[in-house]
Image: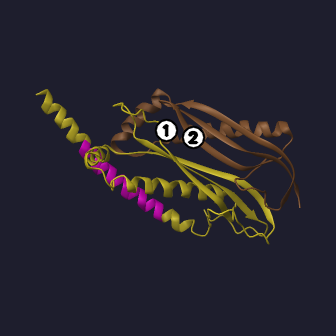
Amino acid sequence: MILTNIDSVPNMRIVEHYGLVSGSTVRAKHIGKDIMAGLKNIVGGELKGYTELLNEARRDATERMIAQARALGANAVINVRFATSAVAPGAAELYVYGTAVRVEAE
Amino acid sequence: MELLFQLLVFLALLALGFFVGRWNEAKHYASIRERERRFAALPVIAADDWDKDRPVRDVWLETACVVISIDYFKRIALSLRNLFGGEVRSIEPLLDRARREVLLRLKAAAAARGADLLTNLRVATSSIYGNKGSQQSIGSVELFAYATAIRYDGPDRGNPA
């Protein structure tokens, strides 16, 4: 599966459009990471636990989008966009969407 | 007596935030500058464009993120600043560091796969984990960057990293 965030795939021709595909996941932080983050909050700096958590969550959301595209018979998703929103205190939704297409070598 | 104790804790946290925070910042900037020189050869553009005359070998989506938190001293400085409003100079370097860091992570990941160009860069900033109004709220912000990595056909130039 080819993913791009531009409206084409370089060197490829789009032969079929399958419409919008998307994937999302809602994640909550867990208490252990929260305590570490609380300590880190005194001296500042990167919260590695959160970085990992969000990377993982985004990967899952992307996997769901890819599964949807694959079920439609697509081999690429173009114009991929990411959105993050806080749906509740301590929980965030990671949402990814794009256009599923079939591409062929030019 | 208890008041004195609380004051001491407050001052200790303030000093810890100030000195360790400043030391971390200096260390981080040194590392950022070093890596920026190392990855200077890999162009990143925000427009949707590439060299269309060259055959492309590989194309993929590259993403990177970083979550950073503010230190205690800056938080107190911010709450004072909130009384008068205006530019918050103590927070600006924090965001500057995070934004340069996320771009460097994006470049490092792309370079590891042999990318020649990162096109259509998008950067998003979100504050996700703060419970507004709560004392326990963690002042943190996420920087997320993504771009389409392009590798042209041609001889391997070797990994710049």
- The verdict on residue B92 being magenta is no
Q: In which image quadrant can residue A62 be found?
A: top right
Question: Residues in magenta?
Answer: B14-33
Write down the residue under mark 1: B128
Q: Amino acid at mark 1?
A: Ile
The one nearer the camera, A87 or B143, is A87
- In this image, B81 relative to A97: left or right? left
Q: In which image quadrant can residue B131 be found?
A: top left
Q: Where is the C terminus of chain B found, in terms of image quarters?
A: bottom right
Tell which subunit mark 2 falls on: A
Image colour for chain B is yellow
- The verdict on residue B23 being magenta is yes
Residues packed near mark 1 inside 10 Å, few (<14), some (14 to 19) or many (20 plus): many
Residue at 47%, 42% in the rendered image: B127
Tell which subunit mark 1 falls on: B
Image colour for chain A is brown
Main SS class of the magenta portion in the image: helix
Q: Residue furthest bottom?
A: B53
